[in-house]
Amino acid sequence: MRRALNRNLVMLLASHHEGDVVRTSDFHHIIRRRGGGLIHVMDVLSTMGILLDDRPAVFDTWLESKTEQLPAPIACQIRRWAHVLRHGGPRHNPATSTPPSPTSASRFLP
């Protein structure tokens, strides 16, 4: 795995110049095709401060595919609702990806 990571980094950084950023969309298909670990490459580039992860969010892509057949006004409202649930809004906190702690549920138990 280390050898593949080194090869992929050499390939990506061979023409890199100071101040340039490396866009994930420019290389993620190549790394996957070569059998490399995309996450490891992204971690190294992020640590170097030159990674720009410009891929669309998986959730947004999924939501778009689920609402594309709906009438435009309904699809727009569903996307807006999902965005508020996921990211929060003026009267709603964003959803958390961490499960609630056992102590927070204890107040509901006898």
Image (spheres, rainbow, N blue to C red):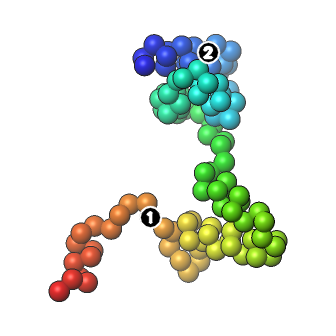
Q: Is residue 35 visible?
A: yes
Check disc 2 and give the amino acid type: Met
Q: In front: 23, or 8?
A: 8
Q: Name the residue at 68% across, 73% down.
A: 78
Give the image quarter of residue 105: bottom left
- Number of disc labels: 2
Q: Which mark is residue 55?
A: none
Callout 1 secondary element = loop
Q: Which residue is mark 2?
A: 11
In the rendered image, residue 18, in percent from the top left (x then y), is placed at: 65, 21
Check disc 1 and give the amino acid type: Thr
Task: State whether residue 94 is above or below residue 110.
Answer: above
Q: In the displayed structure, does residue 22 sit left or right of residue 9?
A: right
The first of marks 1 and 2 along the sequence is 2
Q: Residue furthest right?
A: 72
Q: In front: 26, or 110?
A: 110
Callout 2 secondary element = helix
In the rendered image, residue 1, in percent from the top left (x then y), is placed at: 43, 19
Give the image quarter of residue 110: bottom left
Q: Name the residue at 72% across, 66% down.
A: 67
In the rendered image, residue 16, in percent from the top left (x then y), is placed at: 66, 19
Q: In the displayed structure, does residue 1 sit left or right of residue 67?
A: left
Q: Which residue is mark 1?
A: 96
Q: In front: 73, or 88?
A: 73
Q: Name the residue at 53% across, 77% down.
A: 92
Q: Name the residue at 59% across, 28% down.
A: 32
Q: Is residue 21 visible?
A: no
Few, some or many residues within 10 Å of mark 1 (<14, 14–19, 20+): few
